[in-house]
Image (cartoon, helix red, strand yellow):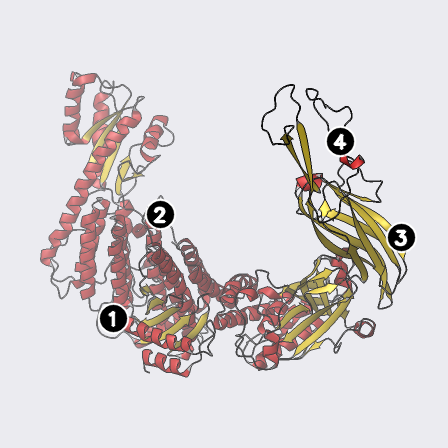
Amino acid sequence: MAVAVAVIGKENSPLYVRTVNPSSELKFMYTIHASLDVVEEKVIVGKKSSGELRELYLGLLYPTEDYKVYGYVTNTRIKFIIIVESSYTTLRDNDIRQMFRKLHNAYSDVVCNPFYVPGDTICSKQFESSVKGILIQE
Amino acid sequence: MEFAVDKNVKPKRMAILSIGDLPSELTCRPLAVVAVLGLDVPTNPVHTAVWESFTLNRKPDRAPLNFKHIKEGHEFPKAKPKRSSYEWHVPKGLLKTNWLHKHASEVPAVAVLFYDLDWDDLLWNEKRVDCANKLENLRTNLQGRNTKIALVLVQRNPPLPGGEDMLATERAAALCSTCELAAKSLFVLPHSDHLFGYTLRLEKAFYEFSQGYYHHETRKIKSHRDHLNKTTHQLLFVRHQFKIGFLNELKQDIITALKHYKQSYANLMEVRASAANMLEVKTVAGFINYKLCRLSFLLNTPLDAISQFRKHIDIFKSKTGPAELSFEHSSWLSKQFSHFGDLFDDAVKQGLAATQTKHPGFYFQQAASHAIMRKELCFSLCQNVMEYPSPDPLEGVEDMEFFGQRPWRPGSQSIEPPDPQRENKGIQALQYKEAYTVNHSTIIISLLSSAVSQFKKYRGPRMRRHLMVQMGEEYFYSREYNKALALLGHVLWDYRSERWQYLVSNILTTALRCAYLSASVQDFLTLGLEFISNWIQSGTEEKSVVQNGIQKVLEGNIPPPPLPGMTVDKEEIEELWQKALSVSNEPLIFTVEMGSIIPCVECRMRFVSRTFSADERVVLQIHLRAKCPQPLKFSKLSILFTNQHYNEQCEISDETSEILGEARNIGNSTSLVLYPQKTKMFTFSFLASVSDVGQDITVSAVAIQLGKETRCCAILRWPAAGNESIASRLPWSSNMTGLGDESSFTQLEIQPTTKIIPRQPQLSLSIEHQPPVLMHELYCIHVKIENKEINSVSNVRLLVDLDEEAEDIVRQHTSFSRGEEKVSSLPIPCLDDVVADQLLPGEKISEEVFMKVNNLGSRIILIKVTYDIEVEVDNKTLLCHCTREEKLEVDTMEPFIFSVNLLNMKCESVQKLRAEEPFLLQVDVISNTSLALSIEKRMLDLCPEVKTTDEDVVSNLEE
C-alpha cells in the first residue's frame, strides 16, 4: 500500500498531501514536487499523440532508491501522486490503478460539493477517510 | 579521482585509497605495455625523432599501445618463482595492491631494442656482437617472463627495392642466428622521409606480439585452476578470473574480459563475508562492478550496465559491516553511485542518449544522499572520539598487500573473532580520522552540483531545485551562509509561485537562520517579513520573536535568535550584528516587492468611483491588512501614480500625519499602526490637474516604509494589480475560508485606475430651425445660448461642424457662415468663432448660422458651445473648461422639378420636329416642397438653330 498520497492542482500547487509518517513528510513533499517534472513531460507527450482520449494513468514516474512514485492526471489537469515502498514487490500495476481510481472517485465527490471551490485545498472528512484506505496501515 | 599516479614515476608506495575509491589503473583504458630500449632520447636527434613518431599524436586510430622508454640499467619487476603446488597455499586476500600497477604499466608485453646498424656498416662484426650482448642482457632482465623480444635496426640508408640486396639478406640471417632471434622479430627502420609510415607498420607488428603475450599469460593463469579447490582457495577463484579479465582488456578483447569479470564477481559472491572481511569483499566487489559497468557501456549495452549496478547495490545495500564504522558503508555506497554516475556521464559524452528518468543525475543524487547519511552517522558515532590512539593502529596503511584490509590485521582470513582490544583501537582511529580529516560538506556539495547540472540537462527543473535546496542546507551546515542564501533565495521564487506552503516554510526557515547567523541586515528583514506572514507554517511564538527581531533591527538593535533550538555562539553573532548595524554605516534603504513574496501585509487600492468630474475631489482608498502576529508600525505611506504629479499629495508619514490629517481631511484614524488580522483604511482625496481632464489617473504602486531613512528602512511596495506578480496568479488564501472582516477585505475590488471627465456644463443651448433644407438655399439655424451657471462664463465659442463620420463629398458641398453676406462660394464645412467674451449669469445670446448645401442627402450637424468658468472647490479656484454639444440631422431636397414637352401647333404632343415648321414648347415647373415658393425670374435659353416665331417672348409671370 501507499506511503504517501497527494492531489496537485492545475497550476501545480498542492491541494492535499498525506503521508503515513509525519516525520518523513518533508522528504515526501520534495519527492512529490519533483515528480511533477515527469508528469508534465508525460502529459505533453500524451497531448502529441492527440485525437484519442488520453490514458489518465501515467504509470511509474520514476523509481528512487527506496520508493516508487506513480502518477495520474485527470482531464481537468488535476494530478494524483502515489508513493509506495520499493520493497513492496507484491504490488501489481493493477493495484496501483485501483488506488488511483478510488482516489479519483473520492476527488470527484469533493468537487461535487457546492461549497468547495475548485483550486482550494481539500479538507473533507470523507476524502480523508478514502485516502486512509489507500495509505499503508501502521 | 583523488589520486593520479604519474605514469612516468614509479610509485614507491601505493597511494592510500579511501573507502570505495578506485585505483587509477582500474579507471583508465588498459593498453598493452611496450618497453622501448636503446633509444638515446633526447641527446640523439635521430632517436628523438623515432621516439616521438611513436609517442606523439596517439589518436584512437593508432594501435592501442603504451610505449615506455626504458633507460639503461632499468630493472623490470622480478617474476616470482613458479609455484609447483597449491596444496599448502592459503591465500591471504583477494586482490594484491601491486598487481594492477605492475601489469598495467611495468611488465612489458613486448620489449623492443633499437640499434643503429646499417647493412654495410664498417664495424659490422663488432656491432653485431654488441647487439647480441644487449639482447642477452634484456633477456636476463626479463627472466621468467614471456615478454616478446624484438630488434629494430635504425638505418641511415633506405632499403633497396624488391629485396634484391643480397648483402642485407645474408647479414640479417647472420644477425638473427647470433642474437638467437626469430627472423620475424627483426625489423629495419630506415631513418628517411617516410619515418611515420614505417612507425605505423612497426606498431602493428608490436601489437600482434602483445596479443600473443597476453593470450599466453591468460592461458598460464587458467592452467592453475586444476590445482585449486573450492574450500581453501575460494579467494583465488575471484583473483584469477579478475586477472584474466584484466589481461584480456590489455589484449583489447573486451567481450572476453567482460565474461571473466562476471565470473569473478560471481565467485566473489560465494566468498563467505564476515564482519572481519566485509570491507575487503566490498572493495573488490566495487572494483569488479566498476569494470563490469564500464565494459557494458563500452559495448553499448547501457541497460546491462544499469541492471548490473542495481544488482550490485541490492546485494550490498544491507551489508553494513561493523556498526561502529557504519559511516564507512555509507561512504562506500556513495562512491559506488558516484562512480556509476561518472561512467554513465562518460557514456553520454560518447553519444549514448539518456532520458528524463534514466540519466546520470539520479546516481549523483543518490551518491549525495549517501554522503549526507555518512555525515550524519559520523556525527552520531564519532562525537565522543577525542584523541587518536597510540600506537597508530593504522600504521602501514600505505604498504598494504591486499586491497580493502585493515592495517592492524593484514592478511588475516581466519574466521575467529579478532583481538577485541586491537579492533577497538583501530575503530577509534578510523572514527577519529572520519570526524577530523573528512570535509563532508565539500563532498556532498560537489555531488549535488554534479546532479544539479544533470537534472538541468534532462528536464528536471523541480528536482534540480530540490537539490539546490539541499546544497543550500549543506552550505548552511558548513557555515557558508552567503552561498546558502544565494541558492535558497534563487529557488524560493519557484516554490512560492506553485504555492508549496510546507516547502516554502521549510526553506524560509533555513534561509532566515543563515541571514541571522551571517548578520545580513537586508536578508534578515526581507526574509523575516516574509516569514511572519500567516501563510507560513510556523508557530505564532516563533513569528512573534522574528517580528520583534525585525523591529529591533530597524531601530538599530541586535535581534534575538529568530528560531528556537539554534545552537549559536552568541558573542560571535552579536559582534557581527554590532558591526552590521553600526551607526557609521551608510543608511540602508531597500525595497521589498510585496508582489513577489508572501505578504505579511496585504494591500488593496481603489478609487471609489470609476470616473470623477474635473471639479470634484478624487477619492482613493488604501486598505491595508496585516497578517503578522504583532502590531506593525510603519513610518510612511505613499502612493505612486503613473503621473508623478500626485505622488506628494498622497503621502502620510508619522511626523506629518496629524497635521495632514486635519488639513487634507484624511479619513479614519491616522496612526500608522496595523493590527493583526485587522483591515485599516486610509483615504486620500485630491483634485485632478487640469491637464488630466479626459485622461486616466492610475496608481502604479503603494508603498509603506518601515524604519527611518536615516538609519535603516525597508520600503514595502505593492504594485497595482494586473502586473505579472505571483499574487495575481493564485490566491494566498482561499476566498471562502475568511469570515467577516477577512472576507470583506478579500472581496474588495481592486480599482487602480479612474477617469477624469470634464465638468458638467450648466449652460443651455437651444437650436431652432425649419426643415426641410432646400438645395442651394441659405438655410438658417438659430442658436440660443443662455448662461445658467451661478458665475459668469468667459471665452464662449460656438463651433459648427459636420459630424465626424460625414463623407468627403458631403463636406465639399456644405458651407457654414454667420450672417447671410459672408456665405462663400467655396465650401466651409466648419465654423469656429468666439461669440462672446463673457456671459453674465442669466444672460442670453442668440446667433444665426447659415448653411448652404449643394447636394442632396441627409447630414448630421454638430453644434458645440465651449466656455471657461472659474469654480471654487475647497477654497481653491479652479478653471474648468466645459462643453455643451447638440446634434442636428437634416435632409436636403430639390426645391422644384422641370419637365419640358414638345407640341405641334395643334397642341398635340410630338416626338419629331420638322425643319422650318413651327412648334410649341411647354415647360412645367412642379414644386417639390411643402413650402410655398415664389418664382422670381425665369428664362429660356435656346440654342442658335431654334428661333422664336414671336417677336417678343415674355414669361407668364411677367404678363
Chain that bears disc 1: A
Residue A130, placed above or below residue B94 = below
Residue B735, placed above or below residue B852 = below
- Residue B783 or residue B36, whichever sits in front: B783
Chain that bears disc 2: B
Find disc 4 in the rendering and name its residue: B939
- Residue in the picture at 36% in, 77% down: A106
Callout 4: 10 Å neighbours few (<14), some, many (20+)?
Answer: few
Callout 2: 10 Å neighbours few (<14), some, many (20+)?
Answer: few
Residue B656 shows in this picture = yes
Chain that bears disc 4: B
| Measured Cα–Cα span from mark 1 to mark 4 | 108 Å
Residue B762, placed above or below residue B662 = above
Label 1, secondary structure: give it.
helix
Q: Nearer the viewer, mark 4 or mark 3?
A: 4
Name the N-terminal-most of marks 2 and 3.
2
Is label 2 in contact with label 3 (beta carbons under 8 Å)? Answer: no
Label 3, secondary structure: give it.
strand
Residue type highlighted by circle 1: Asn
Residue type highlighted by circle 4: Met
- Residue in the picture at 90% in, 55% down: B838
Chain that bears disc 3: B
